[in-house]
Amino acid sequence: MNGFSFRRFLAVLRKEWIQVRRDLFTLQMIIALPVLQLFLFGYAINSDPKHLPTGLLSADHSKYERTLVAAMQNTGYYDIRSLASEAEAERGLADGELLFVVNIPPNFDRSVDRGEQPTILMDADATDPSTIGNAAAALASLTGTLDRDLPQAVQSRPANLPFLFELHARYNPEQLTVLNIVPGLICIVLTISTLFVTTLSITRETERGTMENLLAMPVRPIEVMLAKVVPYIAIGYAQVILIIAIAAAVFGLPVRGSILLLTLALGLFIASNLALGLTFSTIARNQMQAIQMAQFTLLPSFLLSGFMFPFKGMPVWAQWAGELFPVTHALRIVRGVLLKGNGLAEIAPELWPIIAFTLVIAAIATWCYRETLD
Amino acid sequence: MTAEFAIDVRDLHKRYGDRKVVDGLTLAVPAGEICGFLGANGSGKTTTIRMLCGLIKPDGGGGTCLGLDIVRSAPLIRRQIGYMTQRFSFYDDLTVFENLDFVGAVYELVNRHQAVRAIIERMGLADRSDQLAGQLSGGWKQRLALAACVLHEPKLLLLDEPTAGVDAKARREFWDLIHDMAGEGITVLVSTHYMDEAERCGRIVYLSDGKIVVQGSPDAVARGSGLVTYEATGADLDIAARKLRLMAGVEAAAVFGSALRIAGMDRAALDRAIASPDGGGALAWHEAVPQLEDVFIHLLSQPAKGAS
């Protein structure tokens, strides 16, 4: 008697279908999310990044050097430009404009011709080891490049290469992936504890009807919002400290820059998340929608920010999209301050996009926001 | 403006999309009166109440609440009114005391703890003050909500179906409290579906499709309706009621205990129906005074006037 009834089943199915059709928001998400993932994994996510910005430091632009530079370009991994000074090289590496610096030693051609086996020093920004891994590996194939031009006496023999590469992995000499993960983790955790939770706790009021009651009382919505937000800021900072402490104690994470600077910069990042959370909570009608919107933000935070996959490995459009998100810049700030010892001057270029984002989103939130139930 | 009216609004309009939820509503409630707000679901009661306390901006019209403009002075109005939402909207995960303490804090009451303890005492919530609001039964939740509304000693109470789903005894006690407060000079606007509650109001206002259809004291509304009612006793009343409902001129026929009661606007048609052997011919009839309930059933079954 209580067996399966096809008609009951159809009745439920019809009802579900009507509900799905009316819930446009979920429908859009259901479609947009897999499409987005498809594009991200299909095109944007590239663990073999090419065209990495590379600086060239050279005393005398010689013939062998030109051949070598051309060969490096041909691997596809290096986009090489000449640098004027060591200082420029240092600056480029510190603020992330350069991932490699090639140092051609003086009198390179003569040393090669004499069979002295000169060493080309490659400085690499190893804060994200996966970005530079393949490019560095490709160097090994380049030692035979000069063979055609070399005098007979020093023609490349297996045991006696004409010159050597020496990779100098900067900032993260052991190329520990964990050192790259920690800054990313800090940003993601902050996103979850500020954006997610505050969005949810505000929407919960709307959903349970308690917001109507709050609005009818003298309390101002902005007071409600801020009061909801503050505990999570505190929790967020506690999480950051915990992550850094464990990473430093267990994984040997270096803390080279100022913790105060990091704290202040992260405060900006938190503000950007809160602005976004506020906007979401003015739009979302219930907690389910709020979760969906927050997740919609979390996905690019993971994938486009350089957290999970090398930023430079993404096509240009994906990099541009990534630049829009505060998390991308926050990630660079955390890496810069912790691993490179960056100061305010170096991280300033990453601060203003976060500020701009926060202002724009806050303006949208204010515009969407109503103190009434309309 | 005039302080003799606690509520004085004219020609209020509110539409959602194409639907006119409130359509030219004009209402004046003298201070100290208990005004009952009646009407079918969706007739605009809640929307009107929300406009009065500034939660919704009217599309047209305006007026005053406690002498303050409902559009411009909404924040000032909110400090002097107590609004009880239709749905219980306090925090399930807070205790009775914590909820009231929160409300007191939001209203920035001086001597907050004293005020909270006093209201808990007055509402008979003392035994439950440490219980989580989510664990209270419906009647106690309503009491908590009322306590929270009156904690800051408002001059006007807006109660949106405060007794929906509450048992008869709790409703009776709730209304005793409302009358107590009215005796202290508070004006009360209360929406309800219950006739016994409507009869306890000084004035009732009946809404249909966002318009006031009838208003006045319960007696005046009942007598002024023009409705004719007959009552009969006898055997097989249920069968007679079913037959009568199908006859011309009979708008309502219902059995109450040992009596059958019919109502309609057309006396001649009703007379024919009760005399007909197919209708009430076998029963002994006498004319009755129309009750408020007869009037509302009549109003509810009317197609909305002027609605497209």
Image (cartoon, helix red, strand yellow):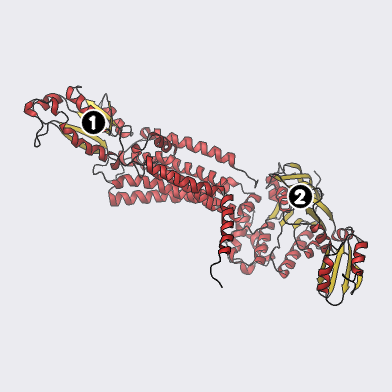
Residue B10: percent from the left, percent from the top?
79, 44
Quarter of the image with the N terminus of chain A in it: bottom right
Look at the numbered disc 2 and give the secondary structure of its residue: loop
Q: Is residue A304 visible?
A: yes
Does A143 sit above or below residue A231?
above
Q: Nearer the viewer, mark 1 or mark 2?
A: 1
Amino acid under label 1?
Met
* Relative to A114, B2 lies left or right: right
Residue receiving disc 2: B210
Crowding at label 1, few (<14), some or many (≥20) Cα neighbours within 10 Å? many
Residue B190: percent from the left, percent from the top?
75, 57
Does B305 sit above or below residue A352?
below
The image quarter containing residue A352 is: top left
Please state which of residues A230 and A339 is positioned toward the viewer in this rendering: A339
Which residue is the extreme one toward the front? Answer: A6
* Relative to A283, A325 lies left or right: left
Disc assigned to residue A46: none
Residue A50: percent from the left, percent from the top?
30, 35
Question: How far separated are the C-alphas under marks 1 and 2?
Answer: 78 Å
Disc assigned to residue A72: 1
Please state which of residues B229 and A332 is positioned toward the viewer in this rendering: B229
Look at the numbered disc 1 and give the secondary structure of its residue: helix
Which residue is the extreme one toward the bottom? Answer: B235
Amino acid under label 2?
Gly
Please state which of residues A146 and A181 is positioned toward the viewer in this rendering: A146
